[in-house]
Image (cartoon, rainbow, N blue to C red):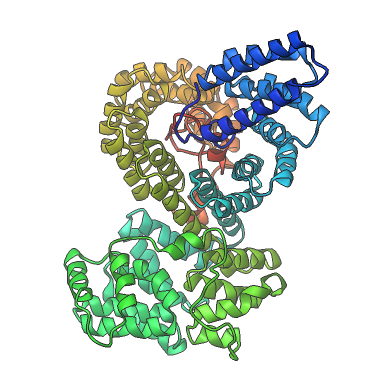
Amino acid sequence: MVSRSWSPEAGCPGVSPWFTSRILMMVLCLSLDNGLGAQATTTAQSQLDELSARAAEAQRRDDYQQAAKVYQEILKLRPDLTGARLNLGLMQFSLKDYSAAIQTFEAVLHQNPKVLPANLFLGLSLLRLQRPREAVAYLTRAQSLDPRNEKTLVALGQANSILRDYGQANNWYSDAAQVNPQSADAWYGLGVSYLALSREAAQQLARTGAASPYSQLLIAESLEQQSRGEDAIKLYERLATTAPRHPCFRAAVGLGLARLGEIDSAEQLFQSELKNSPGCLPARLGLARVAIEHGDLAGAMRSFDELWALDSHFVESSAASSLAGLAPEKVNALRARLGKWIDGENKEAREVLTAALAGEPSEQDFAGAVQATASLKFSAGSPASPRHLFSEGRYSLCTQALRPNLEKLYSADLLILARCAFHSGDYRTAFLASGRAVKLDPENFESSYWRIRTAEKLASNSLLHTSVLNPNSARVHILLGDAYREGEHFREAEEEYRRAIQISPHGFAGHFGLATTYYQNFKIDQAAEKLKEALDLKSDDPDASFLMGSILVLRRQYDRARPYLLKGLQGNPNNVPHVYALFGKIDAAQGRLKEARVELEKSLEADNDGSYHYQLSRVYTQLGNKQLRLPLWRNQRRFEKPLHNGQSGGWACFRLRRPTSERPISSRGIDKIGRILDRIPGTPRVLP
């Protein structure tokens, strides 16, 4: 029976049951019409009527197996009935007999290539069988027949994601979200495609500009997000001593320090920024934050009002970030002050600041994820040049002036547009402008910086919107937790998994997801505790058993680890080499070197970082086999290139992983980018 809830499934986005049923009944009517031909005999007509009624009744009961048999009987009587053949294919699709469905839909299209349901469901069937390149041709034809069909647009996004064409996938998901702003499928796909594009930009910057201040600033921001405050402060302080790379660069560093409590250092950076760039609104916003920290709420309010008058969109998009990290007593004092409106103050600005303190997203955030912000509160006609508008902090006017010519702009103007659009909250425009700037000049690292920042912001907004659309769905919160965890946004991932557990306390996936997040964030004790709860719910789960075995190996509790690892061998075949690696480590530690050699040799195919080769080389050395040790050691050396100049935990590790049943597990959590889009299972699963 087809599930009645929203459920993205393997290989392609979810097809809502109401949508499938509507097509089934539409096609059923078509088959009846075709069955009432003037040439049919009375007996044949009666048979067709009876069979059609039986098929309709079977469909109403969701008895797709019986309905398929009836349609096969109809086709024996009338092989020419396209509608009956189409219905047969839909029944086969509902029964997940995708190979049979493909043959049936191909036969329909042989008779009439322009049948929309046949093209759509043939494409979906091919996606289910992991044949995305073939699927695109049929889905594209379906989209040409009905350009605003949300399900077709989402399916095209999924197919292009599997093909690693994340830019095109993002466009399809964006179109789907515009057609139906309530589509959770579209918003989720949009968010994950933005994450993948952010990762691609990060990889490019890591290859060409790992030592640049832009890379270091991204790393500092990533460390801050991971709650690694001391490491982030050290890096921010080092960046504070470098020459500014672009206007408001020092303000960005200062805001990071302010969020981490380094108020004096932050204030110096804001003042220094304003000496060179008097129109830098982030620096002025930073000084408003400093005023709040010093208890000067009246001064902070004046600053907010002045900033609102210059560019309200800037305040709306930046307030939450600038106020993050305030101590609870400061938050309460500011909230109380905002509740007392004084004559002459801007009431709308107060409402925005109150929402920012509460962590509430703005409508501007959601709208900007799929298209440029269309309505601005300023006149489009401004005599000032965009460069001058930027220098004055009039970011929305600057964006408005440059955006219509985005495709014609050169690198310098594209960078101005990216800055202005980002600071005015028009993240989609900033994303497009920075992406075009990267193509024109890959060596300009500022372009990559804005590309990464905007993609992450858009991803966050899109995934948040998915949650807003489905606040009471444990499955949606688990999917969001997966996405945040894959991007190493562990705090957000923990929140999503906890919400899932609140909704479904006995759901295995929520507990396992939270345990995995703890594990990846090096909270080993919390991971073990939560994992025990997951195994209490599903004691024989091989993936949870593998993770528990990994934790016990880390704790050197080798004898306790073995039973869990043995269960891990029964899970996903892709995980098996990593289980062998752990067995090899146990055997080596307990002196069984020959057994360790055998186990580690089985693990080499999954060695992504050289660690298994290194462990095996040590075993060979202990066994006295130096001839084997040397080539393996040289092989291991190629994995030793440090990430981004020796920094750890930074943005270059921003990665996505596939869900449980598809993705190999590694104790180091290494996997290729974007695999989360390969398959979205019916029961979301997560892995370390």
Q: Looking at this view, is 240 or 261 the one in front?
A: 261
The quadrant of the rendering that contains the C terminus is top left
Q: Is residue 451 left or right of residue 501?
A: right
Q: Is residue 43 above or below residue 301?
A: above
Q: Is residue 103 above or below residue 202?
A: above
Residue at 71% across / 31% down in the picture?
Answer: 118
Looking at the rendering, which quadrant does residue 588 occupy?
top left
Residue at 53% across / 83% down in the picture?
Answer: 390
Report the number of discs.
Answer: 0
Q: Looking at this view, is 146 or 583 the one in front?
A: 146
Q: Looking at this view, is 135 or 495 the one in front?
A: 135
**Residue 647 shows up from this direction:** no
Q: Is residue 263 left or right of residue 270?
A: left
Q: Position of residue 141 (x, y in %)?
A: 75, 41
Q: Is residue 354 above or below residue 69?
A: below
Looking at the rendering, which quadrant does residue 160 occupy?
top right
**Residue 149 shows up from this direction:** yes
Q: Position of residue 287 (x, y in %)?
A: 32, 80
Q: Position of residue 676 (x, y in %)?
A: 53, 39
Q: Position of residue 593 (x, y in %)?
A: 44, 19
Looking at the rendering, which quadrant does residue 224 occupy?
bottom left
Residue at 51% across / 56% down in the picture?
Answer: 644
Q: Is residue 80 left or right of residue 204?
A: right
